[in-house]
Amino acid sequence: MENEETLSLIAAAQKGDDSACETLLSNNSPLIKSVIRRYKNKGVEYDDLYQLGCVGFIKAIKNFSFDYEVRFSTYAVPMIAGEVKRFLRDDGPVKVSRGTKATAIKIAKFVDMYKKENGESPTIDTIAKEFGIEPTEAVFIMDACKFPLSIYESNDDSGRTLEDKLQSPENEEEKLDKMMLKQIINELSPRDKKIILLRYFADKTQSEVARVLSVSQVQVSRLESKILCKIRSRYGDG
């Protein structure tokens, strides 16, 4: 699928066109499968992995901004992988293959050398070309190995980092939502505030929160439900 067609379908999907979303899912099925294939043999059925990948892909469609200076597929890969990893996190850390780690080490050396010679970090495309891999593959390796690379450094004349490009601009409505959210959280009891901050800001699982609070996962689940119900009853579902 050509990039222009992809962007056109994304625009339609973001406006609520379900058929456009289905077309994007269908045409990008090979991309989703290439990402979830890395998480096989983790105790999760392949079909379930694929569904998780689709959830991540749909989130990528929803959150993608046309101001990003990256191809949609490059943006979607970490979103797909992130959805799968969040699901697997309860069963322990996701293991990274030796091959992926070895490539990450080579990339790290290449980046150091490139920065010394050029005074700046290489772009994702430059890295991909150097190692004969797709840009999406480079993104996956960096994400899987927690390798910051040029994601957090300026890699073009604009002075913007790749991280900046992958973040949607914050409008006034979003700023207001953040202010309201901060007020809501500050009004919670210390224990309730800790649960919400750990679950939704530190991205901790209920099991991880339970260990921090020295309670059972079931208790955390019940407490979380009560807190959310309390918030909704007071402030509405928005």
Image (cartoon, grey):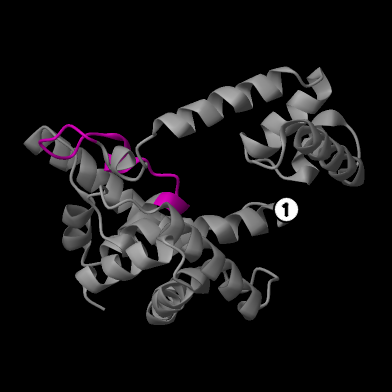
Question: Quadrant of the rendered structure where residue 141 is?
Answer: bottom left
Q: Nearer the viewer, residue 70 or 87?
A: 70
User: Is 180 drawn above or below residue 166 in the view shown?
Assistant: above
Residue occupying the point 46% across, 53% down? 144
Q: How far across and how far down the image is residue 176, in percent?
A: 51, 27
The residue that mark 1 highlights is: 90
Magenta segment:
143-160
- What secondary structure is the stretch in magenta mostly built from? loop
Residue occupying the point 65% across, 68% down? 42
Task: Answer whether residue 146 is magenta in the image.
Answer: yes
Lateral position of residue 223 relative to residue 129, left or right: right
Q: How far across and how far down the image is residue 119, in percent?
A: 11, 32
Lateral position of residue 20 relative to residue 207, left or right: left
Image quadrant containing the C terminus: top right
Image quadrant containing the N terminus: bottom left
Please indicate, yes or no, whether residue 102 appears anywhere in the rendered image: no
Residue occupying the point 69% across, 24% down? 184
User: Is 177 drawn above or below residue 51 in the view shown?
Assistant: above
User: Is 165 drawn above or below residue 129 in the view shown?
Assistant: above
Crowd around label 1: few <14 · some 14–19 · many ≥20 (10 Å): some
Q: How far across and how far down the image is residue 167, in percent?
A: 37, 41
- Quick one: SS at disc 1? helix
Please indicate, yes or no, whether residue 45 appears anywhere in the rendered image: yes
Q: Nearer the viewer, residue 78 or 43?
A: 78
Q: Nearer the viewer, residue 194 or 136?
A: 194
Number of on-image labels: 1
Residue type (three-letter) at the residue carrying disc 1: Asp
Lateral position of residue 191 relative to residue 181, left or right: right
Task: Answer whether residue 147 is magenta in the image.
Answer: yes
Lateral position of residue 173 relative to residue 165, left or right: right
User: Is 56 drawn above or below residue 225 in the view shown?
Assistant: below
